[in-house]
Amino acid sequence: MSNRRGATPTSALREGILQEIRSLVVRSEPGTRLPTVRRMIATYGASQHLVQGALEQLRSEGLITSHVGRGTFTASAGEEAPKRRNVLTLLFHHPYERGDRIAQLIHQQLSLDGHNSLVLTYSNTKQVMEILRGGGSFDACVLQPRSSVVPISLLALLKQRAEHLIIESLAAEHLDIDAVSNDPGTCVELALGHLAERGYRSILWVTEAGENYFFRRLAEIFHAYCCAPGAVGAGSRIVQAETKAHGLGIADLPATLASLGVRRDTGVRTAVVIASFVDGSTILEALESCGLSAPEDLALLRIGTPDLETDHAGRITTVGRPSTQAAQTILERLYRRWNEPAAPWQTFYDTPSIAEFASTQSRSAADRDEATSRKRIASAKARV
């Protein structure tokens, strides 16, 4: 690609990529699916920023259209250019990667689809309400409150400023808005089924004692299992742990784990499920500080985000919905609402999945590994 007189190398490259993709679009039949952004990056040797910028320009010209979950297509004859929407994602600030990742994925896809996306992180509800009262309107707002309390006044203001409102990670059956949440019942079922398959019947369910909707529902459902004859083993119970005064997570996880009474060499293998915002490395460090390890002394499973390494740390079996799935569901609900504005309000529950790691190794395998370890130690002592 030659550099035009007066054009900087960057602008010449940008124009060159635009013309390359424009030529591809012009040569293609109407309704043809275009290669993915990743494929175009490899084909044209350009950055993601340049490719997405070219696609946005062609989309604004009505030459291509994007459909969430399907891809980008050349425009059909007589097809109108899609409306450019203004979307606000309002994210309550807390040092937990999951919410940031979901907001980032939503922003990226909306921008790729040609919409105006704004992500606003807040820590003071009154302050963000003052900003919203200052003006501006949106075609939709995605609210991610995390564990914060959502005042009715904030919801009312958002409904004034946005045509549609979706809340992520919170059920909202009686609020006349759409919501997307993880399925707590299936989470408990997956966790207990996984542990039962590996021979663990005595379950200690450690959960944050705060007002988080999801953790509270998980504990209620697990309590029902404890009350049902034969559902879980004797000694299974819920352990409420105090949360941090400012922030997310259990305030003193080592003390909480120490209070469970799990000891080495007792011959009793127990499973511990942790439902908390605390990250995976903190869980492992707290376990080590108690002189315990998983799965040698106990099976360890957490309720979290299976596709985030900060949650599973490469060692902790994790049950929950991936961040990619949460973002995709929000986008699907959003596009559905735009296509069917009169549809009934709905809380949609994502189906969770499980990422298996060594922390929930089966009892027989753990016993076998432990026996092998003892033999190696004895053999080493004999050689000495």
Image (spheres, rainbow, N blue to C red):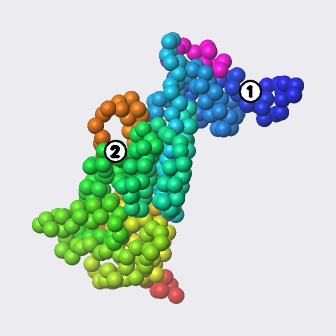
Q: In this view, does 166 lie to the left or right of 11?
A: left
Location of residue 184 (image quadrant): bottom left
Read off the magenta span.
22-32
Which residue occupies 34% across, 44% down?
A: 177
Q: Which mark is residue 249?
A: none
Residue 91: x and y in percent read 49, 54
Q: In this view, does 162 lie to the left or right of 121?
A: left
| Element carrying mark 1 | helix
Residue 326: x and y in percent read 41, 47
Residue nearer the viewer, 310 or 133: 133
| Residue 26 covered by magenta stretch | yes
Is the C-beta separation of discs 2 and 1 under 8 Å?
A: no
Depicted 199 relative to depicted 172: above or below: below
Q: Residues within 10 Å of mark 1 (few under 14, many from 20)?
A: some
Label 1 belongs to which residue? 15
Give how far apart the Cα atoms at labels 2 and 1 are. 43 Å
| Residue 66 covered by magenta stretch | no
Residue nearer the viewer, 347 or 33: 347
| Residue 108 appears in the figure | yes
Q: In this view, does 105 lie to the left or right of 223?
A: right
Amino acid at circle 1:
Glu
- Is the N terminus in the top left, top right, bottom left or bottom right quadrant? top right
Residue nearer the viewer, 207 or 146: 146
Which residue occupies 61% across, 14% down?
A: 27
Q: Residues within 10 Å of mark 2 (few under 14, many from 20)?
A: some
Residue nearer the viewer, 168 or 271: 168
Label 2 belongs to which residue? 177
Q: Is residue 51 left or right of residue 339?
A: right
Of the two numbered discs 2 and 1 on the same chain, state the one appearing first in sequence.
1
**Which residue is the extreme one toward the top?**
77
